Amino acid sequence: MSCDYFALAAPGVRILQPYQPGKPESELRREYGLSDIVKLASNENPLGPSPKALAAVEDALGQLARYPDGNGFELKAALSARLGAPMAALTLGNGSNDVLELVARAFLTSEHEAVFSEHAFAVYPIVTQAIGATARIAKANPPDHEMPYGHDLDAMRARVNERTRVIFIANPNNPTGTWLKTAALEGFLKAVPESVIVVLDEAYFEYVEPAMDCPNALRWLDRFPNLVVTRTFSKAYGLAGLRVGYAVSSPPVADLLNRVREPFNVNSLALVAATAALEDEAHLARGKAVNRDGLARLTVFCRQRGLAWLPSAGNFLCVEVGRPGREVFLELLKRGVITRPVDNYGLPRFLRISIGTEAENARLLDALGDVLDG
Ligand SMILES: *Cc1c(COP(=O)(O)O)cnc(C)c1O
């Protein structure tokens, strides 16, 4: 008789819903026999990484037999100089996803609770439940709000109690694209007890425009020792495949995160690529310009088609397609365009579309127009 491993699994693991990644291009090629595929499903940088990062990777290939620097000295030194934070405030991760997990491992137990919003990034419930902690989900803003379906900070605060150890906030948020403005977020940080770790996930920070009033949370680190700001090289820096991200926090919190960190969690190619990518500000600026143009083009299309969309401070747009988003997603697949349905985020009539190159955006708009007409 075979053993019931499901029954043996930790209770938090039994209730986990596996993360649903964007559909890989290779999968669509296999399933549909298509060759000319456009992937706008995972908010990757359509320009790819900086050529300087690629050159650094090539240079490092000869050292692959060696373990990476487990402390990531060079990358931390570069980040420290760039961000104006001490190296002791930094925790490197295998993607910022890894850092989110480190926060859960360091601060949550089965006795504790984590607070996050409806329609928030899918990794928050995963890391919370995997550790056996309880997720407290706050209602999001109503559809007629200035930031529809975005985080409602009052609702989040109302979920905080003596068992709360962590609050996860994505700013801007994925998949909605909505953001929290400076004064509101600062007021929230002041109101939350110091004993609660507040994670501000800034995966899309580099795309934020000054006029949006979406804050750089690093400015608050001196005042709020419970604040953990996470960033990534996966989005604007175009290094999603290498997996590297980081947290900036007070040094005592960073010390705890680093204790639970796997000793060599960031590989040697990721370390050198990220260090080089940080220096290439011109590449970053090109990516932002492409994103700005692409977002503008997509919103013009939506307006012409009478489709509603959510305000976005990121490199993607969440569009209300007027029918089940998954249907439109499947129709677009047949036309070789991969987008992201967000029904699993509680947004069944929306489709999340990443911004691509000018040519990729044109393909998307052609295909989407075709689907909407058909
Ligand atoms: C993409 C994303 C991340 C980062 O993922 P990594 O590749 O693990 O760095 C983190 N938070 C949000 C909200 C994201 O959308």
Image: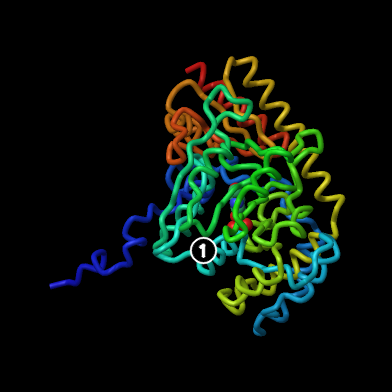
Residue 100 is drawn in which quadrant? bottom right
Q: Is residue 215 above or below residue 254?
A: above
Q: Nearer the viewer, residue 360 or 296?
A: 296
Q: Is residue 200 above or below residue 257?
A: above
Q: Give percent across and percent down for residue 73.
A: 76, 76
Q: In percent of the image, x 43 and y 27: which residue is there? A: 324
**Dot 1, crowdedness within 10 Å: few (<14), some or many (≥20)?**
many
Q: Nearer the viewer, residue 211 or 59?
A: 211
Residue 359 is drawn in which quadrant? top right
Q: Nearer the viewer, residue 16 or 215?
A: 215
Q: In percent of the image, x 80 and y 64: which residue is there? A: 85
Identified by mark 1, the residue type is Ala
Q: Give percent across and percent down for residue 256.
A: 61, 73
The colour scheme of the drawn protein is rainbow
List the residue tagged with mark 1.
Answer: 104
Q: Outermost residue toward the bottom?
A: 66
Dot 1 falls on a residue whose secondary structure is helix
Q: Outermost residue toward the left?
A: 1
Q: Is residue 40 left or right of residue 87?
A: left
Q: Give percent across and percent down for residue 147.
A: 62, 30
Q: Give percent across and percent down for residue 362.
A: 67, 29
Q: Which quarter of the rendering shows the N terminus?
A: bottom left
Residue 58 is drawn in which quadrant? bottom right
Q: In percent of the image, x 70 and y 80: which residue is there? A: 69
Count of marks overlaid on the render: 1
Q: Nearer the viewer, residue 31 or 284?
A: 284
Q: Is residue 140 left or right of residue 71?
A: left
